[in-house]
Image: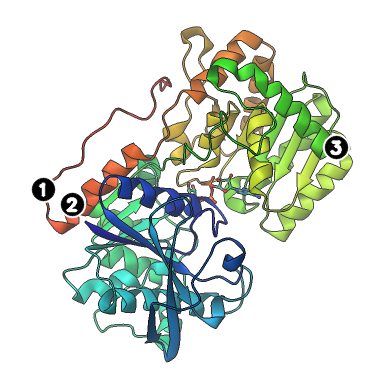
Amino acid sequence: MRILFVAAEASPLAKVGGMGDVVGALPKVLRAMGHDVRVFMPYYGFLPDKLEIPSEPIWWGTAMYQKFAVYETRLPKSDVPLYLFGHPSFMPRRVYYGEDEEWRFTLFSNGAAEFTWNYWKPNVIHCHDWHTAMIPVWMNETPDVKTIFTIHNLAYQGPWRWFLERITWCPWYMEGHNVMASAVQFADEVTTVSPTYAEQIQTAAYGETLEGLLSFVSGKLSGVLNGIDVESYNPETDRFIVENYNADTVERRKANKVALQEELGLVVDSGVFLVGMVSRLVEQKGLDLVIQIMDQFLSYTDAQLVVLGTGDRYYETQMWQMASRYPGRMSSHILFNEALSRRIYSGCDTLIMPSRFEPCGISQMLAMRYGCVPIVRRTGGLVDTVFYNDPMNEAGTGYCFDRYEPMDFLTAMIRALEAYRYKDQWRKLQQRGMWQNFSWEKSAYEYIKIYNRVLGNPDEGKPTEPSQTSGVKV
Ligand SMILES: Nc1ncnc2c1ncn2[C@@H]1O[C@H](COP(=O)(O)OP(=O)(O)O[C@H]2O[C@H](CO)[C@@H](O)[C@H](O)[C@H]2O)[C@@H](O)[C@H]1O
């Protein structure tokens, strides 16, 4: 099969959040399974710092009265062809934000459509989030190219119809008041990144006003759980961490914990409970719960907290202020730093993710891979990936709470803190997390099934064993 991934992010080149992880990892796995997968992404101004890009484009095109160039290179450490959409609007050294956001991503998706009509025609275009949401609309009259639309973040739905009509071609048949709604209607299949979230978005609580439409198209809507890049994120070989280890040598993490405390100016003590958070600092991630309980948690315990993230100025400031109240006990880093995130996963005892909603969540899986026990709110993909710790039956992988309430979160934190005192059981809990199979293989087969379905091919996807091997749902 010929498959073109079109997205705004692809790790490790351009990553702001979890979508970058998905687009950076899944094409490699699909390609290893024998499919001709390629990626189409904007040529951001910072990319030449990260990889070699030929100076001559392979193709020139026009869209929205603009001329653009397409350059060809490869995704790092892979043979996946990467097409870079070159236009001056993407030259600033950032992925998102900016006044022309809606205009330039509409141009980008226009460029991707032109590219597939005129240069390389795939069987399937796999579109990700609103930045690519017009592609299924335009492809509606190209029956030999099928489209899959994956929702990573339903909260951002892209430009409204009235704005689109001013800047681009909105075909006569197009429906939908914004691009996300149109993509949901016109894509051959719509997926999101966990089975639980696929159910939740059909309700008013999670549907972000699209719940009616999403339940109407439920026949073509499914949830495919994300994986993680288990080669890159491997505590046994990770060169960004001080001490490598695996599930059998999990006690070696102590060196990473001490090194992290030293690096971040925390009181060095391998015995204290070290809590981490690696996240975009936005409402989705439950920052208001963190703000409401953390003073109590830090005042009444000897625990320490590390926060790494960027996002809304309000939350960034709150994290800063809180850290200034607990010198030596709390450290906030308002930046994006991949290496530091790995040191947090490998050094902290626990990772908090009290999300308001969570399509899948990558951080909790990375944490488990590194033996860092997740504390999560049971929503979306967090329900599908983290299971209640049950020391009696030696099952479960983390601490969970249901209601989006500060006391529920605080209680889960205290339960984890208590459990941390019982070292043998804590070690087993860490090991159960590390033994989980979060590799992309299983999800890749699910996607292949979907691609085959839209193409009308017989199903050749092999079912594999469930990804959770030792966690049980209680
Ligand atoms: N400051 C920082 N420095 C370094 N690394 C940082 C960082 N902030 C975040 N990260 C990294 O970015 C990724 C975050 O991924 P998540 O899936 O947890 O959230 P996100 O909301 O961005 O993704 C959205 O898309 C993904 C993919 O589908 C869904 O899993 C998710 O639920 C949805 O909200 C992790 O790899 C994390 O380590």
300 up-or-down from 88: above or below: above
Identify the residue under disc 1: 458
Q: Which of 381 and 288 is in front in this view?
A: 381
The first of marks 1 and 3 along the sequence is 3
Identify the residue under disc 3: 265
Mark on residue 452?
2
Q: Which quarter of the picture shows residue 371?
A: top right
Mark on residue 148?
none
Q: Do the residues labelled 2 and 1 touch (CB within 8 Å)?
A: yes
User: For the residue marked with disc 2, what is the amino acid?
Assistant: Asn
The first of marks 2 and 1 along the sequence is 2
Q: Which residue is drawn at 66% across and 46% down?
A: 287
Mark 2 residue's CB less than 8 Å from ligand 1: no
Q: How far apart are marks 1 and 3 (CA)?
A: 58 Å
- Let me know if residue 95 appears in the view: no
User: For the residue marked with disc 3, what is the amino acid?
Assistant: Gly
Percent x, y for residue 364?
54, 36
Q: How is the image coloured?
A: rainbow
Disc 1 crowd, CA 10 A, few/some/many (<14, 14-19, 20+): few
How many numbered discs sit on the rendered protein?
A: 3
Disc 2 crowd, CA 10 A, few/some/many (<14, 14-19, 20+): some
Q: Do the residues labelled 1 and 3 touch (CB within 8 Å)?
A: no
Q: Distance between the residues labelled 3 and 2?
A: 53 Å
Q: Which quarter of the picture shows residue 168?
A: bottom left
- Let me know if residue 238 appears in the view: yes
User: For the residue marked with disc 1, what is the amino acid?
Assistant: Pro
The first of marks 3 and 2 along the sequence is 3
Q: Which residue is drawn at 45% across and 89% down?
A: 66
Q: Which residue is drawn at 87% across and 44% down?
A: 324
